[in-house]
Amino acid sequence: MILAIDSSSLVASVAIADEENIVAEYTVNLKKTHSQTLLPMIQEIFEMTGLSQKELQAIAVTEGPGSFTGLRIGAATAKGLALALNIPMVGISTLRVMANNYNHCNKLVCPIMDARRNQVYTGIYDCSEEEPVTIFEDCAITIEALMKELTTINREVIFVGDGIPAFREVLDSELMVKHYYAKHNFNRQQASSLAALAAVMVEKNEVISSDAFAPKYFRLSQAERERMQG
């Protein structure tokens, strides 16, 4: 039994999965802070299912990239639960989780999260098999640099993520590779996709301790940048 937690963006999503099924999933896409929503969501999903946290074998959480605040809240929540229950953790790329919304797909999947300053958090994945295979490593780059990379690869691509509204116009006008946009039901992070990937990693014993887990931010926070600038 795995508890999966994603609070890396505006979306907050929690799921419980066993080795065969997604038992329950609770996803909220509202302008509320995750510090207000995440713990009540976890509590409610256990109450609704009648399961006990003591039945959990691992806690899975998105490790980034994403919102600095969201990643910290998700990490703190997951680490606290894992420590209290004395169970291991699994950390998985936010972008890989988004790509996992698709499998056995004959197109590339390219998550784009709006990283501000004309940049996106992105990666490129081949999702033609059961799990996503990384074609272009996760990073924070300009949309122009991403389009250049996609042009070089030259395969049809599906975009997914909250960066679509900000960059759709430039993608449509300048990207010559045939491309598509995910429908809204597959366009955001889903804890069920995280749980599915985590189940495979738990089976392979690819887990870490709560002490060892840390989010991956990909770049300095605004406060850190301002401090360095003096």
Image (cartoon, rainbow, N blue to C red):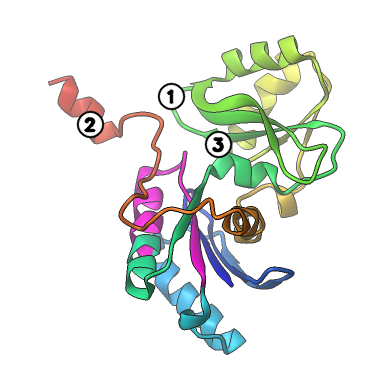
Real-space CA distance between mark 2 and mark 3, rounded to the nearest whole angstrom? 21 Å
Give the labeled residue for mark 2.
224
Mark 1 lies on a secondary structure that is loop
Classify 119 as above or below 114: above
Q: Nearer the viewer, mark 1 or mark 2?
A: 2
Q: Which mark is residue 31?
A: none
The residue closer to the viewer here, 40 or 103, is: 103
Q: Nearer the viewer, mark 3 or mark 1?
A: 3
Identified by mark 3, the residue type is Met
Tell me which corner region of the image, top left, top right, bottom left or bottom right, holds residue 179. top right
Classify 182 as above or below 10: above
Q: In terms of sequence position, does the residue under pointer 1 or pointer 2 come before the other? A: 1
Real-space CA distance between mark 1 and mark 2, rounded to the nearest whole angstrom? 15 Å
Q: Residues within 10 Å of mark 1 (few under 14, many from 20)?
A: few
**Number of numbered discs overlaid on the protein picture:** 3
Looking at the image, the residue that sits furthest to the front is 205
Q: Which residues are magenta?
A: 57-77
Quadrant for the C terminus in the image:
top left
Q: Is residue 83 left or right of residue 162?
A: left
Q: Residues within 10 Å of mark 2 (few under 14, many from 20)?
A: few
Q: Which mark is residue 113?
A: 3
Mark 2 lies on a secondary structure that is helix
At x 33%, y 67%, the residue is: 83
Identified by mark 1, the residue type is Arg
Q: Is residue 68 left or right of residue 175?
A: left
At x 22%, y 31%, the residue is: 224
Mark 3 lies on a secondary structure that is strand
Q: Is residue 63 left or right of residue 160?
A: left
Classify 151 as above or below 109: above
Give the labeled residue for mark 1.
117
Is residue 131 highlighted in magenta? no
